[in-house]
Image (cartoon, rainbow, N blue to C red):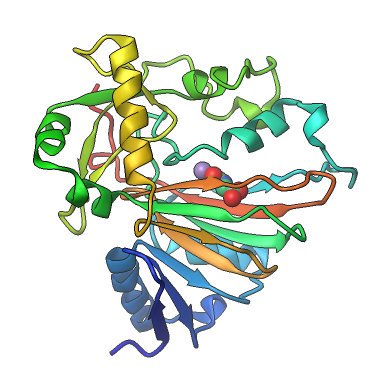
Amino acid sequence: MPSFNIAPIDASFGAVVTGIRLATVDDERWRELHQAWLEHALLIFPGQHLSRDEQISFARRFGPLEFDMAAISNVKSDGTLRIEADNDDVVKILKGNMGWHADSTYMSVQAKGAVFSAEVVPAAGGQTGFADMRAAYDALDDGLRTKVETLAAHHSLHYSQAKLGHQPEAGSAYSGYGFHAGPVPLRPLVKTHPETGRKSLLIGRHAHNIPGLDPDESERLLDELVDFACQAPRVYHHSWSAGDVVIWDNRCLLHRATPWDMTQPRVMWHSRIAGDPVAEASLN
Ligand code: OGA
Ligand code: MN
């Protein structure tokens, strides 16, 4: 029995964890949390109010970080807001996040997961959605399951952002991340989780151009899979309160932001846990 409270949410995945203070988790407690994370794929910790250093230290327990702490925010450094009409590189990235995706599948090593927290939340909207790609794989009909087993897709941020009309401005530090000129990673549509052995669909907005299919057919199949996968009971949208922390398993979930009125501030903090250099490597 874990020493904290763990209440599964009403979905195929996810649990709310209370009775634990993440800032002071000891090794024994962390091992229990890690087990719970592998099982539920998404853990939600209300009201933690972690400091920057506490969030980074907690995230590091899950492995080396791809990056320590990035602001996912429409507040500029001078305190003014980026609104939708600005449509600058940052707004375009924030809007891009509103499509279902897994993080860093466009890098040669996709992310393992993320510790993500809310500092400032808008009065309405701005939930984060999560979708269980293990349950989605399990729910495929036999024909489609057999078909996807043999397929792979390219993953690129150039591709997914260009679909929204976004060509990043040269030299923009924020939107520079992920817009690399290296090989476009090729990833199987079915990923086996390196720690649980469970299979899941690896899809989302960065995926395109399945070798062996023509581009239209590829897009149709990928759209069909996302539409099917991201439905009840496989989805959960978290309505944030300031101070909430979640950790998601990027090896078996998709996630997305949802719209909010950008005349209101939304400040989230993302610590991205690096994937295993072998298990999360692309095929190419
Ligand atoms: C991310 C992301 C969603 C959100 O930070 O990678 O997709 O709700 N964020 O802001
Ligand atoms: Mn993301």
Q: Residue furthest toward the top?
A: 214
Q: Quadrant of the C terminus?
A: top left
Vertical placement of 284 versus 81: above or below? above
How far across and down, in percent of the image, does residue 242 sit? Answer: 70, 68
Query: Total label count?
Result: 0
Vertical placement of 179 versus 266: above or below? above
* Residue under the image location 77 percent in, 46 percent down: 261
How far across and down, in percent of the image, does residue 206 sit? Answer: 43, 28
Q: Is residue 153 left or right of 114 when viewed as pictured? A: left
Q: Quadrant of the N terminus?
A: bottom left
Vertical placement of 98 versus 237: above or below? above
Q: Is residue 214 left or right of 52 when viewed as pictured? A: left
How far across and down, in percent of the image, does residue 86 sit? Answer: 82, 28
* Residue under the image location 61 percent in, 75 percent down: 48
* Residue under the image location 33 percent in, 45 percent down: 229
How far across and down, in percent of the image, does residue 176 sit? Answer: 61, 25
Instruction: Place residue 189 in its image quadrant.
Output: top left
> Quick check: can you spot residue 69?
no
Q: Is residue 193 left or right of 98 when viewed as pictured? A: left
* Residue under the image location 50 percent in, 24 percent down: 160
Camera-side residue: 211 or 55? 211
Instruction: Place residue 240 in its image quadrant.
Output: bottom right
> Quick check: can you spot residue 117?
yes
Vertical placement of 194 versus 175: above or below? below
Q: Is residue 149 left or right of 15 when viewed as pictured? A: left
Camera-side residue: 40 or 27? 40
